[in-house]
Image (cartoon, rainbow, N blue to C red):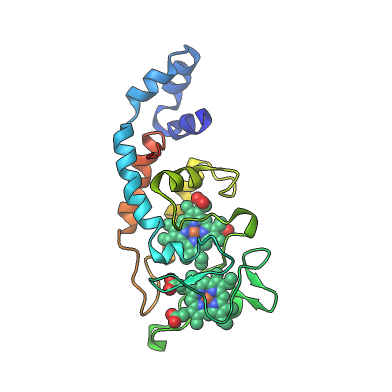
């Protein structure tokens, strides 16, 4: 944890932070130099939760063995499964139907949406977002054993620019985009990290 807390200060306050760590008063000073309070961080996480548990995101972050579809999260049609690597079962791989970008709008609704490397997390690390409380979700996304080894800066990078994440704001004809803007999501994610990534209970 300390490593994460230090690395998020790496940008502006690296030199100062290093000196203060050396003098052994790092913890209290970190709390003071932090731009956001724990309460700010917990409040920011609530917006993050709304995004992670939006259908466009959680349909790919289910606990079961199939992706979900539509706002009500029905199991994916055609008996599509996660498969041993998240790319779909042998013979029914995600890339058979999902390409690297959405089909042209003129194709209308109910066509397979697309983004590069369209797939689910692998079965060993399912990265479940559905049906978790805020606290559980917060601890889950921070758990490096379960999130693909991402520390806080890597998580921020992922939510800022990963193509599967960005697809949530451009999901193709007939699907509602994520209800919070991407800018606001990223800004709340930064606030949460600046506050030390605190989790609600
Ligand atoms: C097409 C499926 C798909 C969609 C849609 C999708 N994800 Fe993911 N997500 C993945 C996969 C697969 C991974 C695992 C990392 C990888 O392989 O890129 C992942 C990993 C993540 C992670 C890091 C792992 C963790 O547990 O912290 C976050 C955060 C995340 N996604 C957020 C989102 C958000 C936010 C949205 C919606 C805006 C979204 N995802 C939509 C497939 C998807
Ligand atoms: C046989 C073709 C086919 C395969 C294989 C396939 N899909 Fe789909 N998928 C579709 C179609 C068609 C839609 C659009 C359905 C609609 O809008 O009526 C879709 C929609 C989706 C959606 C959008 C859900 C939403 O409403 O937010 C997700 C997520 C998804 N697929 C994930 C996957 C993943 C992950 C795989 C591989 C494990 C996969 N699909 C394999 C055909 C396929």
| Looking at the image, residue 67 lies above or below residue 123 | below
| Looking at the image, residue 193 lies above or below residue 123 | above
| Looking at the image, residue 79 lies above or below residue 84 | below
Kindly give the residue lying farthest to the bottom in the view shown.
Answer: 107
- Relative image position of residue 165 (x, y in whole percent): 45, 60
Looking at the picture, tell me which residue is in the foreground, 26 or 52: 52
Please report the residue visible at 50 percent of the width from the left and 34 percent of the height from the top: 4
Looking at the picture, tell me which residue is in the foreground, 40 or 159: 40
Q: Is residue 99 visible?
A: no
- Relative image position of residue 31 (x, y in whole percent): 36, 24
- Relative image position of residue 123 (x, y in whole percent): 63, 59
Please report the residue visible at 59 percent of the width from the left and 78 percent of the height from the top: 79
Q: Is residue 192 visible?
A: yes
Please report the residue visible at 34 percent of the width from the left and 64 percent of the height from the top: 178
Looking at the picture, tell me which residue is in the foreground, 60 or 104: 60
Please report the residue visible at 32 percent of the width from the left and 54 percent of the height from the top: 183
Taking the image as shown, residue 176 lies to the left or right of residue 146, namely: left
Kindly give the residue lying farthest to the top in the view shown.
Answer: 23
- Relative image position of residue 52 (x, y in whole percent): 41, 56
Image label count? 0
In the rendered view of the protein, which quadrant contains the C terminus?
top left
């Amino acid at each position: 944890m300390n490593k994460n807390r230090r690395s998020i200060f790496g940008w502006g306050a690296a030199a100062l932070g290093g000196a203060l760590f050396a003098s052994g008063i790092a913890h209290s000073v970190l709390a003071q130099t932090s731009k956001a309070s724990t309460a700010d961080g917990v409040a920011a996480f609530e917006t993050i939760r709304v995004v992670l548990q939006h259908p466009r995101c959680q349909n790919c972050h289910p606990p079961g063995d199939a992706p979900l579809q539509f706002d009500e999260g029905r199991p994916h049609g055609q008996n599509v499964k996660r498969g041993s690597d998240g790319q779909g079962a042998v013979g029914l791989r995600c890339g058979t139907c999902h390409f690297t970008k959405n089909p042209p709008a003129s194709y209308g609704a109910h066509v397979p949406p697309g983004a590069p490397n369209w797939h689910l997390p692998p079965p060993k690390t399912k990265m479940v977002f559905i049906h978790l409380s805020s606290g559980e979700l917060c601890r889950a996304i921070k758990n490096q054993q379960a999130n693909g080894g991402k520390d806080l800066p890597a998580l921020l990078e992922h939510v800022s620019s990963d193509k599967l994440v960005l697809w949530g704001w451009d999901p193709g004809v007939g699907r509602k985009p994520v209800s919070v803007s991407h800018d606001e999501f990223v800004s709340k994610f930064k606030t949460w990290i600046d506050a030390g990534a605190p989790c609600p209970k």
